[in-house]
């Protein structure tokens, strides 16, 4: 089958790459995306396996009224470019990633009315009104897939039903990362081999509106006396490009010895290497970040959940955060923003290296295995003729 994966903006490569892996090698896969997406670590292994439809990289500044006509025109040009390839290559199925503006639906209906279409939903909050939810119906998309079972389950039971939508229009898949070619086995000694050091990673953009970094820094200051006295060592790795202002705050608080930062964008290969060798992932999501805290696992998934489900990692979360049901058995929970209770338990030996290993060894349900998810994704796209009862969780 000729399948086009479409991503109009330069983000969410970590969701795009696993889909390519699921579709190869028995389908002709076309990827339509900005040119710089193909230079991303996640995409590089597929450069010779997919046919590229490269969109212009130019981005127009958000919030500038004068730029709005140019942004809309640039999107229309992308649709014209995609439509040309769809007709020429006789594309059978189009998978749209990250559609988040109403005018996209107008253009999709205009250009691709008679082609089967799949929709990957990253943020279901976009579809909480009846008018917007109706754009997801069977006359528009063949299937709407969430990237989290919890979000899928919540939306179907609290959104789709109330709007009169058929629940069979919705499903989910995990864009698992373990099968990607850039996930390599490390040689030599890893920090995981040091029985006296517990490594906690915080992946993602370093922004206090998205995670409570200030709460982490204050907690480390509280734990500082214990860090000086104890033989158990702890290392926190912030897996994102660290702003100068944040680096200065870390230095001013004397936390450079415990917090590792990156001065540049963290390549996908480095991010996955560090994550899979860590002891736990800290989410740093609590009520201090505002409304976003309550949207997770109801209307949108956090990438940290995907990391934990891909590699079987324990997570450190606030009780403000509605942790994924599957991760609860391997979650270490603290109250509100008081992550210092976890840090002190680590330093005092109550949360040992062996304890983290035990949590990591807790088996995940079979539905999260790479083989199951590959089959599940393909069946939800209608690719496998011998359909098994694997969709809908």
Image (tube, rainbow, N blue to C red):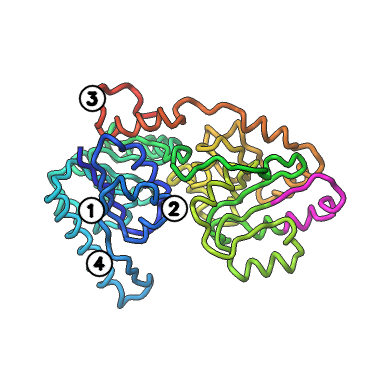
Q: CA distance from mark 3 to mark 2?
A: 33 Å
Judge by depth and name the residue closer to the eye, 303 or 141: 303
Q: Is residue 11 left or right of residue 317?
A: left
Can you tell which quarter of the image residue 141 is in?
A: top left
Picture quadrant of residue 249: bottom right
Q: Mark 2 and mark 1 in contact (Cβ < 8 Å)?
A: no
Residue at the spot of label 4: 74
Horizontal and vertical percent position of residue 271: 54, 51
Q: Is residue 228 magenta?
A: yes
Of pointers 2 and 4, the one earlier in the residue sequence: 2
Distance between mark 2 and mark 4 Cα atoms: 26 Å
Q: Earlier in the sequence, mark 1 or mark 2?
A: 2
Which quarter of the figure is the N terminus placed in? top left
Of circles 1 and 3, which is in front?
A: 3
Q: Residues within 10 Å of mark 2 (few under 14, many from 20)?
A: some
Give the residue number, with chain letter if any, for mark 1.
105
Segment colored magenta: 218-235
Q: Report the residue marked by disc 3.
A: 385
Task: Decide if residue 148 is in sight here.
Answer: yes
Earlier in the chain: of badge 1 and badge 3, it is: 1
Is 254 drawn above or below residue 164 in the view shown?
below
Q: Nearer the viewer, residue 221 or 270?
A: 270
Mark sitting on residue 41 = 2
User: In the rendered image of this protein, does residue 225 appear above or below residue 348?
Assistant: below
Mark 3, mark 2: which one is toward the viewer?
A: 2
CA–CA distance between discs 1 and 2?
Answer: 30 Å
**Residue 146 located left or right of residue 295:** left
First along the sequence among labels 4 and 1: 4
**Compared with residue 334, is residue 53 higher up or lower down, i.e. above or below?**
below
Magenta stretch, main secondary structure class: helix
Pick the quarter of the image with the C terminus.
top left
């Amino acid at each position: 089958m000729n399948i086009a994966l479409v991503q109009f903006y330069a983000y969410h490569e970590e969701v795009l790459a696993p889909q390519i892996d699921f579709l190869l090698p028995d389908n002709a896969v076309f990827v339509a995306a900005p040119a710089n997406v193909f230079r991303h670590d996640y995409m590089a292994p597929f450069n010779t396996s997919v046919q590229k439809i490269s969109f212009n990289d130019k981005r127009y500044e958000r919030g500038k009224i004068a730029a709005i006509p140019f942004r809309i025109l640039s999107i229309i040009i992308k649709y014209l470019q995609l439509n040309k390839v769809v007709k020429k290559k006789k594309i059978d199925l189009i998978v749209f990633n990250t559609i988040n503006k109403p005018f996209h639906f107008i253009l999709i209906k205009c250009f691709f009315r008679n082609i089967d279409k799949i929709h990957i939903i990253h943020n279901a909050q976009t579809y909480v009104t009846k008018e917007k939810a109706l754009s997801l119906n069977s006359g528009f998309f063949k299937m709407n897939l969430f990237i989290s079972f919890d979000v899928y389950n919540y939306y179907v039971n609290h959104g789709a039903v109330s709007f009169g939508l058929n629940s069979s229009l919705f499903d989910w898949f995990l864009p698992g990362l373990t099968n990607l070619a850039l996930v390599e086995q490390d040689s030599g000694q890893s920090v995981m081999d040091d029985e006296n050091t517990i490594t906690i990673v915080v992946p993602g953009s370093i922004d206090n509106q998205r995670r409570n970094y200030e709460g982490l820094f204050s907690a480390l200051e509280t734990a500082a006396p214990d860090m000086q006295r104890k033989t158990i060592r702890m290392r926190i790795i912030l897996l994102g490009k660290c702003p100068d202002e944040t680096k200065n705050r870390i230095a001013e608080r004397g936390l450079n010895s415990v917090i590792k930062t990156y001065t540049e964008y963290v390549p996908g290969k480095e991010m996955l290497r560090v994550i899979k060798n860590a002891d736990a992932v800290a989410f740093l999501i609590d009520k201090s970040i505002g409304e976003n805290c309550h949207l997770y696992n109801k209307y949108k998934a956090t990438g940290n959940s995907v990391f934990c489900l891909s590699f079987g990692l324990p997570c450190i979360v606030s009780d403000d955060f509605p942790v994924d049901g599957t991760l609860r058995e391997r979650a270490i929970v603290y109250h509100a923003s008081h992550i210092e209770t976890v840090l002190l338990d680590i330093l005092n030996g109550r949360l040992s290296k062996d304890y983290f290993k035990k949590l990591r060894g807790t088996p995940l349900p079979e539905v999260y295995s790479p083989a199951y998810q590959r089959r599940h994704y393909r069946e939800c796209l209608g690719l496998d003729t011998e359909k098994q009862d694997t969709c809908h969780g």
